[in-house]
């Protein structure tokens, strides 16, 4: 069984997905999109820190 991480392929998939999601957005809309994602990640990390603390 192959258990190898293909980082280049993974990054390419993430970039392609983000391009599709943000295609046609203005700069302000893209900033809001990424800021919202960052905020959600920070909330998730804060919850995980409380669980494992």
Image (spheres, rainbow, N blue to C red):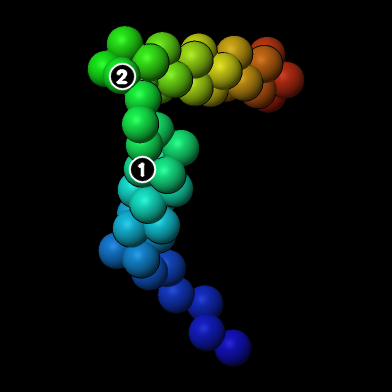
Quarter of the rendering containing residue 48: top right
Which of 3/6 is in front? 6
The residues tagged by marks 1 and 2 sit, at their Cα atoms, a distance apart of 13 Å
Above or below, 7 against 15 in this view is below
Quarter of the rendering containing residue 53: top right
Instruction: Name the residue at 57% across, 18% down.
Output: 40
Query: Mark 1, residues whose alpha carbon is within 10 Å: few (<14), some, or many (≥20)?
Result: few
Q: Position of residue 52 (x, y in %)?
A: 68, 24
Quarter of the rendering containing residue 43: top right
**Upstream in the sequence, badge 1 or badge 2?**
1
Above or below, 6 against 50 in this view is below
Count up the numbered dots: 2
Dot label at residue 11: none
Which of 14/42 is in front? 14
Callout 1 secondary element: helix
Instruction: Name the residue at 62% across, 21% down.
Output: 44
Which of 45/53 is in front? 45
Q: Position of residue 42 (x, y in %)?
A: 52, 16
Pick the quarter of the image with the N terminus. Answer: bottom right
Q: Is residue 7 visible?
A: no
Instruction: Looking at this view, name the residue that lies furthest to the right.
Output: 51
Q: Position of residue 33 (x, y in %)?
A: 44, 20
Badges 1 and 2: C-beta atoms under 8 Å apart? no
Dot label at residue 19: 1
Pointer 2: what residue?
A: 26
- Left or right of residue 19: residue 53: right
Above or below, 3 against 19 in this view is below
Callout 2 secondary element: loop
Which of 3/26 is in front? 26
Q: Is residue 3 visible?
A: yes
Q: Position of residue 29 (x, y in %)?
A: 38, 15
């Amino acid at each position: 069984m192959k258990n190898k991480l293909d980082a280049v392929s993974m990054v390419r998939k993430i970039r392609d997905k983000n391009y599709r999601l943000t295609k046609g957005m203005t700069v302000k809309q893209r900033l809001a999109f990424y800021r919202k994602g960052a905020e959600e990640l920070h909330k998730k990390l804060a919850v995980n820190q409380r669980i494992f603390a």
